[in-house]
């Protein structure tokens, strides 16, 4: 993941008014996992990516693909 992807996720999450913990709870992950994804230090599964996208009302292209 590059920094742009991480920033898109962080930006979408904050625009939705969600903390890392709230997003994590909504998608069945831990706050640490969301933090690592945003930091570019964890490559989430497709299942987790889609759950995040649904929660934030974004597409995979919006958040994870160039």
Image: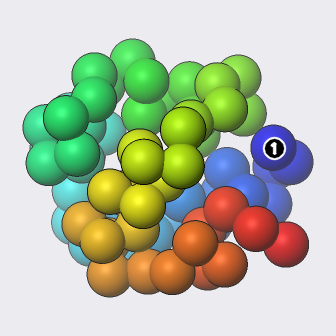
Residue 10 in view in this figure:
no
Q: Is residue 53 left or right of residue 55?
A: right
Q: Quadrant of the C terminus?
A: bottom right
Residue 17 in view in this figure:
yes
Q: Residue 37: name its quadrant.
A: top right
The colour mode here is rainbow
Q: In the rendered picture of this protein, how many numbered marks are placed on residues?
A: 1
Residue 4 on image: x %, y %: 80, 60
* Residue annotated with mark 1: 1
Residue 35 on image: x %, y %: 48, 29
Position of 63 relative to 30 (above/below): below
Residue 15 on image: x %, y %: 35, 74
Q: Residue at x 64, y 25 (%)?
A: 42
Residue 60 on image: x %, y %: 58, 72
Residue at the far front in the pictured view = 47
Q: Is residue 41 left or right of residue 8?
A: right
Front one among 59 and 2 = 59
Q: Which element is circle 1 on?
A: loop
């Amino acid at each position: 993941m590059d920094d742009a992807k991480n920033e898109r996720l962080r930006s979408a999450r904050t625009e939705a008014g969600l903390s890392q913990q709230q997003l994590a709870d909504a998608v069945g992950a831990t706050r640490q996992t969301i933090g690592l994804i945003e930091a570019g230090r964890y490559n989430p599964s497709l299942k987790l990516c889609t759950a995040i996208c649904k929660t934030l009302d974004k597409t995979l292209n919006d958040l994870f693909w160039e």
